[in-house]
Image (cartoon, rainbow, N blue to C red):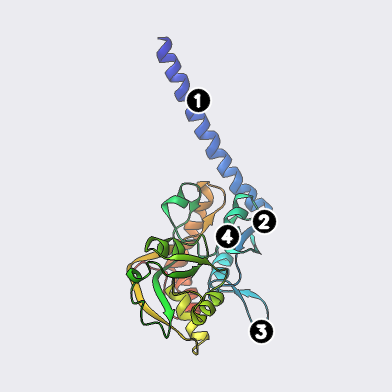
Amino acid sequence: MKKLAAMLLALLLAVAAGLAAAEGEQDALAKLKEKGTLVIGMEGNWSPWTYHDEKTGELTGLEVDIARLIAEGLGVEPVFQEAPWDALLAGVDAGRFDIICNGVGYTEERAKSYSFTTPYVYSNKVLVVAESNDEIKTVDDLKGKKTANSASSTYAALAEEYGATLVPVDTLGETMDMLVQGRVDATINAQVSIADYLREHPEAKIKVVQVLAGDPIAYPLHIGEKYQPLVDAINDILEAARQDGRLAEISMKYFGVDMTKAE
């Protein structure tokens, strides 16, 4: 009887703890709305995702528009805070950002510690080399080669899986410069980012040698605190925007193609 009573007590305590956690999550969402702002972490230096307009200096890009759409749906004002890629996760852990909207690809490892929304963009990965490089044709040729990527990015991890040595960089422009100068041999990067770079820099002496199709990277919003109500609220906003065409419109604006659906 005592053992049964102890089991019932443990069960009641577990249920109570779960209810308290759920109530706390709801309170956190309510407090965010009461605060009236959504603090968004992003780099601000990676066209066409987040960057500064050369003429006005204004922060713009696909993910700026996505973040504004989310904030509007929540009924709050967006507040953008810029930081280097490798400082974004630390910033959201420290509570400086409510969310990260900066091309943070979903991984099972990240999902152990953070919450993610449904993706707002899908992108294939591409292998890029200097125009004069005829040695590297596929990712199987990366073993023993140097690749340039942000240190904690999904692309860096993939390059290392193929035996490449990582040379960390902060911007896509820096990556392209290192390729042309021969300081690195290749980079694995987002197809949409490379296409946008080539549109803006048609003189760039680089080329795409392989499209790694069939396994697109999904880009969801990264939620700082792991609580479901904010995730659910943002998912509802994204789904409504997907259904009425607003997401596709944003994608077309920056990429010239609808990248909001998984192929």
Camera-near label (4 vs 3) is: 4
Which residue type does callout 2 highlight?
A: Gly
Residue drawn at x 63%, y 79% is 53
**Element type at marker 1?**
helix
Q: Are marks 3 and 2 in contact (CB under 8 Å)?
A: no
Q: Nearer the viewer, mark 1 or mark 2?
A: 1
Residue 17 spot, x, y in % from top left:
52, 31
Residue corresponding to mark 1: 13
Q: Nearer the viewer, residue 122 or 24?
A: 122
Q: Earlier in the sequence, mark 4 or mark 3?
A: 3
Q: From the viewer's perspective, is residue 83 above or below residue 27?
A: below
Name the front one of labels 2 and 4.
4
Q: Residue at x 35, y 74 (%)?
A: 211
Q: Quadrant of the C terminus?
A: bottom left
Front residue of 97 and 154: 154
Q: Mark 3: give few (<14), some (14-19) or many (20+) Cα within 10 Å.
A: few
**Residue located farthest toward the bottom when viewing the structure as drawn:** 203
Residue 198 picture location, percent across and down: 48, 84
Residue, disc 2: 36
- Label 2 SS: loop
Tell which circle, 1 or 2, labels the residue nearer the N-terminal end: 1
